[in-house]
Amino acid sequence: MTETNRRSGGLLRNRNFRSLLGARTAVFFGNSIGVVGLSFGILQLPGGSGSELGVVLFVRSVALVGLLLAGGVFGDRYPKRRVMMIADLLAGVSQLGIGLEVVSRHNDAAILLLFSAINGGATGLFMPASTGIIPEVVDRPLLQSANAVLRGTINLANIAGSGVAGVLIATVGPGISLLVNAFMYFGSVACLSMLRGAAAPTRSGSSFLADLVAGWRSFVAYTWVWVIVAQAAVINALSAGARQVLGPVVANGQPNGPTLWAFALGAQTVGLLAGSVVGLRFKVRYPLRTAVICISFSFLPIFVLAAPVPLIWILPAMFVCGFAIDLFTILWETALQSRVPAEALSRVSSYDALGSFALYPVGLLAAGALAGSTSVQPALYAGAIAVLVIGLAALLVPDVRNFRYADDPVPAASR
């Protein structure tokens, strides 16, 4: 039996890990169905429009970001399983409400916005606890393998969910797909209810604000944490604008461009899955060196979009990018879980998520302003160079370059 099989087999014999894996799979499978159902559901409502969909998605994203920090505090203050279950219940009820609106063909904007805000806020509460609970479920030597298995299963769930969404929308309509999404949240609650022995004691004696400030201090105390998060904030903004806005613009102006772009997104998903498989057995002495090199590969699709080459080259570029990003995610999450104390992990994770995507809307807005102008190609070249330089620049920081997973008690924070 190989080392990989021993590790994955050991994980799957762990009842708590199986329960967590089932919960995460249900959520991501359901969400990959729901995101498609929401888009077509609102567009097909009486009076529905792209602008209404945009507002609904905006409200959801604002609520998500707005409650990330609260999710970090709650995840460290209360048992993480309980926080995740409450978040999933709220998300399920809100998605059920949106689904019933779509099925009944009502277009009450206030109700849609309210339920969307609840759904986004619930996701913000869920995310930090879902990262922080993993060290409570598996032993430290298995953290990277656990993250790889979770990432691989999530990628498979996303692929399967997208296919199921297409079938549901074509046969029974988008409203039903939203109801399926809602019941997947309830399925996650059922899986989480089977977790045993993973609940940390409830903390008390400090205020919410004090916990929030303490979480910030923990976040900035680790140089390698805030450097990578700052790097990711810029790279995510540049990549989002290039791939979500300018990429379709470039593709739309070439023969078979939309079809090739759809295949490119599929290639990226396959790359993500391949990254998960490799991450299961990939071991390096200095993991953040590899992680930084991986995130730097985000420059590749941007460069291909700018270069005077056939658009077909975007397929391998997106595959390589997806592979590298998934491997980065596995190494990064394992680094956090390995070195950040358990009592602060959810809060540090919440600051990580908030910081990493803080500039995301800016990248989308900037790319939208450039779309249709003669500056698209120069902007793509500049973006590709910036991503590569900013990505590799983190290697200049000793705490990043020399980082190793902790097999001993958590060391003092680097400052």
Image (spheres, helix red, strand yellow):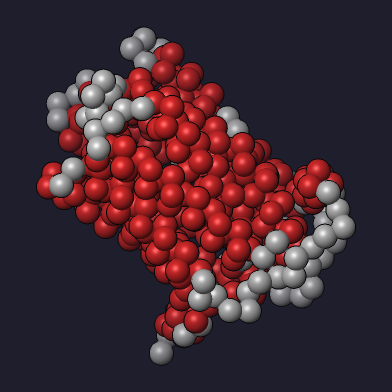
Q: Is residue 77 in view?
A: yes
Residue at (58% x, 38% y) in the render? 65
> Nearest the camera: 22 or 241?
22
> Nearest the camera: 40 or 326?
40
Instruction: Indicate the quadrant where residue 257 lies.
Output: top left
Residue at (28% x, 24% y) in the render? 48
Residue ranking furthest to the right: 205
Residue at (51% x, 82% y) in the render? 14
**Which x, y percent locates residue 354?**
62, 40
**Which x, y percent locates residue 21?**
45, 69
Side (left or right) of 82 relative to 209: left
Residue at (31% x, 37% y) in the render? 101
> Nearest the camera: 294 or 86?
86
**Which x, y percent locates residue 247?**
33, 28
**Which x, y percent locates residue 113?**
45, 31
Side (left or right) of 74 relative to 151: right
Residue ranking furthest to the left: 171
Query: Which quadrant of the rendered structure holds the N terminus?
Result: bottom left
